[in-house]
Image: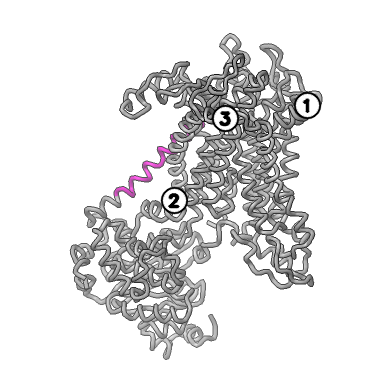
Amino acid sequence: MTAGAEGRGEQATTLTYASVSGRTRRRLVFDRLIPWLLPLAFVAVLFPLFDMIFWVAQKAVPTFTLATLTETQVGFGGGLYSMILGTLILIAIGTAIATGIGIAAGFYTAEYAPPAVASFGRLAGNILAGVPAIVLGYFGYYLLVLYTNWGFTTLAGGIVLGIFMVPYVYRTTDVALTGVPPTQREAALAMGARPRQYLLRIAFPIALPTILTGIFFAMALGLGEAAPIVYTAGWSSTPITGLMQPTSFLTGAIWLFYDLPPSEGTLLTLAFQAAFLLILIVLALNVIVQLLSDRYRRRLQGLFE
Amino acid sequence: MSYENQVAPLMPDPEPDSEPLPAEAAGNRPAAPAKSARLGIPRSWWAWIGSPVALLPFLVLALITGVLLNASALRNFGWSFWSFNYNFLPQTPDQSSWGIGVFVLGTALTAGLAIVFATLLSLALAISVVVYLPSGPSRVLNMLTNLLAGIPSVVYGIWGFVILAPYFGITVEPTLRAFLFWLPGFGGPASEIGSWGILLAVFLLTIMIIPLTTALMRSALQSVPRDLVDSAVALGATRWEVTRRVRFRVARRGLSSAILLGLGRALGESVAVAMVIGGVTSIPVSLYSASTSLPSFIFFQLDSAFTYPDLLVLLVEFALVLLIITMVVNIVAQRLTQTELATATTVGTLLSEEGELER
Amino acid sequence: MSAESVPNPNGVALRVRHLSVRARDRAILTDISIDIPDKEVTAVIGPSGCGKTTFIRSLNRMTETTHGLTVQGSVLYRGQEEIYSPSVAPVLVRQRIGMVFQRPTVFPISVYENVAFGLRLEHQPEDRIEQEVEYSLVRAGVWEEVKKDLDRPALSLSGGQQQRICIARALAVRPRILLMDEPTASLDPVSTQRVEATLEELSREISIVMVTHSIAQAARASTRTAYFYQGRLIEEGPTEELFERPKQELTEEYVTGRFG
């Protein structure tokens, strides 16, 4: 081939960097440049993260005392007690609902449902995860506040939060069970295990860490949501007394106090303290998730090879 | 040798039902033509009773849509609904000035710009993790982006409102105006109110969706078969060329789906945007203008809507439009990718980390 | 042929000396020394896990794509140039020493673009690419079958055609040496036969190193054979000799099918 002959004779005598020129040289130089450009993205993403944590801590920590956690906000004073309590109860209701619906639906989708039904369920789950939180809030307001005539209640807030969390639990359960290696199933069934025995004794233990990961993840997201509960759980400064009462919650504290004028600065500080507390909780949940998946990794090391 | 079995599927088998089951699995039950998804159980009452359970998420979704449709009764949908003219005066209700245009424009601007920036940054992060970094730093980076994913939107909001806004007003915006005035949108006047406006909202949205898009892009890039990568390397492609010409190409559906899911998230974000965008219902003249968006507006206004039933109905219709837009975006995103892992959830993050088992 | 424009003084395509490969604390290859002759087909045989795949991957620095592998010893390109020298660009090594994999690895693009892949990297002019694509497909023995389908997605072809597209793709960058990792392992007998015929054609112009688990294939398609066992090179020589008069007992046991 004459077309291939030009330049190839000389070029072929050596393989060194020094021997390349023109286009090839540009390619190699560009390839070397890329790794130097990518860290710019790290800075662009991680700097804001640290900046945020720094400033929130800076605004919150100097006045953060035990009283911040144990006292109820009254007027311009007090602490976050009622909001912490409210958040815990809301997230408890939400987790209960999301876990119940999510795990049941995930189980059936992964193991029992005919393929068409399963893929439809998955699609619906993914779409549900993409429904804006504020739309859920409107839904909850209409159905659970107006239609039922409950007014603002903790229960309504918890239910909407649960619906918000469902898709995360549902999809993780499904993915965790579908991800159980088929060899495990075949081995179990070949040994004469009944399907239900296989599910409970083999599939579920293998899938459990992933499912738990999903639940913790859903909790972290639920904790930080304001849009679905502001208009369902309402607001009440006093500590919650019953599920059919409105309640305060941490994200709500931020939403209500963030734009108060400086003359009411103590409440702004309270908002920052709520933010600080939320970051701490999210951090803790992250650590739990990390530990869980590390343990999972170790335990199942041999399984996927 | 480690790489001889390298191609062990990173994702669970997309069609588990296609695997033949051992004959024993069916036990002594009569063989049935249709099998349930995995267990190979003949379609008995179990599967039929189970089906609705699997459809619970769909039922919830249908319930949400139904309630909103019922609440709105589609009262205001008409030509004027799509106008850019919005002015709600409770004393003199006038349907013709209840247009959704400004809100759609604000939403499109903020979410659109945010997804552009987020795509670039998360592509860079995902490439770094998948292609360039060794596993130690990769895990640290993953942990940090996961942390970013968990930060509540109100926290972003208060940080943006109290800390960032003055900084944007004093430093960022004048700098951008000085250097980028020739770009449309960058040369205009400052925000009418404080320094809250589109730019700040875009910044927060970008940071907020990056964890999701990064996680999804990472798993898309990781799912590119190693054989293909090796083939390109063996043809004399540099690392960057392999990434651009093979990884991007093979994973392009997954990458597009990641972008769309990020867009969906940005379109639906209410609280953080509500806190920093200024809430002005006029057409923005520059990127520094205060503006509004669908989700942030309906979040902001529900308070007043308690008092005015007309406004409430209008807001429900806005919510319906928002719901439909995000649904369309999400469905397209789902259609794009075959892998079941690409959920709209950031759970993909956690699972793709477990994918490292096979790496 | 341009490949012949530089005379190869010693008739050696690759001279391997004391090559050892370790994966962390495990030795995969130990002290391999062998000369790969120019313009012949060298078969590498041995039971699975004997390190034969790692061996050919270490011949064009593909080992570097696997984390944790360390390579010691030397590989001299054309008997002269150390490919592991720090001043050598791996990209150039892989352009000269191509590789074809066990499973067909066509990219999800058209047949034409697959074969043009390596040329596009260098931004060759389009008419040049067109010529090379056709010529490479001819050399890979698949031109007649795909000349009407150049714009079809390569994935729509049969497995055997895909594998020969991969060979064409590797040939398009004009390598001097082609490394093949069980190129017919996933093919049916007819396709296997075609690929083997292609190899014979190609060996007139370039050197081929082929890993195979099929003893019969080594006997059919190669002129020299190297037998690997547990990371060591046990025996190496002209194929006929190795099969008929093996010097080592291990080799004899393997080629006569007593184990492996």
**Which colour style is shown?**
one colour
Which residue, given by chain and number where applicable, does mark 1 sit on? A149
* Mark 1 secondary-structure assignment: loop
Q: What's the residue type where badge 3 is placed?
A: Pro
**Looking at the image, can residue C61 be seen?**
no
Amino acid type shown at disc 1: Asn
Q: Is residue B274 magenta?
A: no
- Residue labelled with disc 2: B131
Closest to the observer: C113 or B294? B294
Magenta residues, as a range? A29-51
CA distance separating discs 1 and 2: 56 Å
Task: Give the secondary structure at mark 2.
Answer: helix
Q: What is the C-alpha distance between the residues marked 3 and 2?
A: 37 Å
Counting from the top left corner in percent of width and height, residue B186 is at 36, 26
Crowd class of label 3 (few under 14; some 14 to 19; many from 20; radius 10 Å): many
Is label 1 on the same chain as label 2?
no
Q: How many numbered tags mark residues here? A: 3
Which chain contains the residue that carries disc 1? A
Residue visible at 51% across and 61% down? C25
Image x and y of residue A164, in percent: 66, 37
Q: Nearer the viewer, residue B126 or A18?
A: B126
Tag 2 subunit? B
What whole-number distance in Å separates the C-alpha atoms at marks 1 and 3? 25 Å
Vertical side of B37 occupied by A279: above or below: above
Verify CB contact (< 8 Å) between mark 1 and mark 3. Answer: no
Q: Name the amino acid type tagged 2.
A: Val
